[in-house]
Image (cartoon, rainbow, N blue to C red):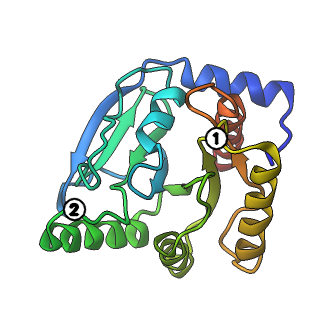
Amino acid sequence: MTADFTRGEMEAGRALFAADWQFAWAARSMETLPKMTGIEIAFAGRSNVGKSSLINALTNRKALARTSNTPGRTQEIIFFESGGDLRIADMPGYGYAEAPKEKVKAWTALIHSYLRGRSNLARVYMLVDSRHGLKSADIETLDLLGQAAVSHQIVLTKCDQPKAAELEVRITEIEAVTRKRAAVFPGILTTSSREGAGIPELRAAIARLIKERL
């Protein structure tokens, strides 16, 4: 279910992402990460969960984040900025099978180090395909986020595709898994990048987070 937001929060979210969002940085190692400034949020999810499409919808850009049908294509943490207090990190997709094992090992290590060493990382939005629910790779990522003590929230993608009853079952199943995990922020956000459903609410959630951190 999507959380309730005030009119002011909805407007703050709209204004936040009406800015001119641009590519800012690409990091393949801890040494090449940008300086920790402002507030950072990150998007994580299995390959082909619709992460790039969601970032593009969120920022009102058609091709800010690269979309691809090839799992494991993004092998870096990609950062986007708009000149304000917020920076977005697009993390490499996990659960891929086609990338070489050494590359997978290298950027998995980068993800682990990033999560543990980024003091300005306010929240990770963990994307889950609403058609499939939590997979084993998602559970492993939930474990990692919990161990790193990083606040994270579930965002369901492609919510225009399952039937309403199926979507409700999926939400109930995920809530049963996450309820016992202290680092999971309560409330599941439902989105559809294709139809724009839930995007204003996700923007409002991020605007609320920034207000709380400033």
Q: Position of residue 88 (x, y in %)?
A: 44, 42
Disc ID at residue 206:
1
> Where 135 falls versus 2 (above or below)?
below
Residue drawn at x 64%, y 39% is 161
Q: Position of residue 81 (x, y in %)?
A: 39, 32
What's the residue type where badge 1 is placed? Ile
Mark 1 Cα-neighbour bin, 10 Å: few <14, some 14–19, many ≥20: many
**Mark 2 vs 1, N-terminal side:** 2
Give the spatial CA distance, label 2 vs label 1. Answer: 33 Å
Q: Quadrant of residue 8?
A: top right
Q: Quadrant of residue 11?
A: top right
Q: Secondary structure at mark 1?
A: helix
Question: Residue 62 versus residue 202: which sits nearer the camera?
Answer: 62
**Image quarter of the C terminus:** top right
Q: Give the residue number, with chain letter if any, for mark 2.
A: 98
> Where 192 falls versus 145 (above or below)?
above
Q: Position of residue 42 (x, y in %)?
A: 47, 51
Disc ID at residue 188:
none
Q: Secondary structure at mark 2?
A: loop
What's the residue type where badge 2 is placed? Glu
Residue drawn at x 65%, y 22% is 14
Total marks in image: 2
Q: Nearer the viewer, mark 2 or mark 1?
A: 2
